[in-house]
Image: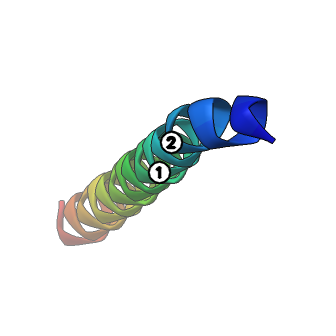
């Protein structure tokens, strides 16, 4: 039982790190997708206007 008490905090911190990094990478991916869509829209507007 002592082994669980020793390993549990490390597993908890590891899980928190995993979910934090996952959230950061997902946010970055969504931001890049939104930026690419905005650039496509701007290019399409420029082609229609020219």
Give the residue drawn at x 36%, y 47%.
28
Q: Residues within 10 Å of mark 2 (few under 14, many from 20)?
A: few
Decide if residue 47 is on the left or right side of residue 7: left
**Looking at this view, is 11 or 43 the one in front?**
11
User: Camera-side residue: 16 or 37?
Assistant: 16
Query: Percent position (x, y) of residue 36?
Result: 38, 50
The residue under label 2 is 9
Mark 1 residue crowding within 10 angstroms, few (<14) / some (14–19) / many (20+): few
Question: Farthest residue toward the right?
Answer: 1
At x 44%, y 40%, the residue is: 17
The relative height of residue 46 versus residue 29 in the rendered view (above or below) is below
Of labels 2 and 1, the one closer to you: 2
Mark 2–mark 1 contact, CB under 8 Å?
Answer: no
Tell me the SS state at disc 1: helix
User: Residue 16: which numbered mark, if any?
Assistant: 1
Cα–Cα gap, marks 2 and 1: 11 Å
| Residue 41, image quadrant | bottom left
- Nearer the observer, 12 or 44: 12
Q: Residue at x 55, y 41 (%)?
A: 18
Q: Nearer the viewer, residue 38 or 33?
A: 33
Q: Quadrant of residue 27?
A: bottom left
């Amino acid at each position: 039982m002592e082994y669980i008490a020793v390993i549990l905090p490390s597993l908890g911190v590891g899980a928190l790190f995993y979910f934090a990094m996952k959230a950061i990478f997902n946010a970055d991916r969504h931001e890049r997708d939104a930026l690419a869509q905005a650039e496509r829209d701007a290019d399409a507007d420029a082609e229609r206007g020219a």
